[in-house]
Image (tube, grey):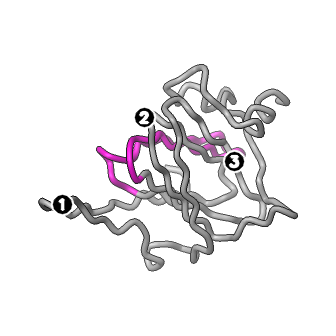
Amino acid sequence: MIDGIQVIPLRRFEDERGWFMEVRRESWLPKRTAQTNLSFSRRGVIRGLHYHERGQDDLFVCLEGTARVVVLDRESGETFCADIGDRNPVAVYIPGHLAHGFEALTDLVFCYHVTAEYDPADPDEHGVPWDDPRIKHLWSTSSPTLSERDASVAASS
């Protein structure tokens, strides 16, 4: 596994009312989180790959559905890939210097806790194309739905 990535098992407590699960404890993490983001993605969407030069780390949790998390160490070329969510309730901690993203294998609700607040005046967002040859084979789709920003990263490389 790539140095710095942590896979944290999550326990789900179920009864006739539904279920309960802790998704983050600061004591689990090497750095404190500063912001929490929530996204909904339709099946076939890829978000990323992104990395942060100033050190924002991410804690990924798929709250509903299934996501494929893909991480690339841009220097060594080493990769990490895990399907997380309904059948594999884990959180994945990713140091921000690693390029990271996820694919919606189903419609999903995705939560990411980050260690730095987003600054729209000076964003620390950089990209690696989703179809970089080092990771292209890890996705389940060859024609993802991308944001304009992620599509422009792919087009410019």
Residue placed at 45% from the left, 33% from the top?
105
Element at label 3: strand
Number of residues whose C-alpha sits closer than 10 Å to that of mark 2, classed few (under 14), some (14–19) or many (20 or more): some
Indicate which label's residue lies in the foreground, 3 or 1. 1
Residue nearer the viewer, 91 or 19: 19
- Type of amino acid at the residue the image marks with label 2: Thr
- Type of amino acid at the residue the image marks with label 1: Glu
Residue placed at 32% from the left, 61% from the top?
10
Count all numbered tags in the image, as a single digit. 3
Label 1 or label 2, whichever comes before in sequence order: 1
In the image, residue 13 lies at what x, y percent? 21, 64
Asked if residue 69 lies in the magenta stretch, the reply is: yes
In the image, residue 46 lies at what x, y percent? 59, 36
Residue highlighted by disc 1: 14
The part of the chain drawn in magenta is 63-90
Whole-number angstrom distance, CA of label 2 to CA of label 3: 21 Å
Residue placed at 53% from the left, 37% from the top?
103
Element at label 2: loop
Residue highlighted by disc 3: 50
Residue highlighted by disc 2: 106
Indicate whether 61 appears above or below 66: below
Q: Residue furthest top?
A: 142
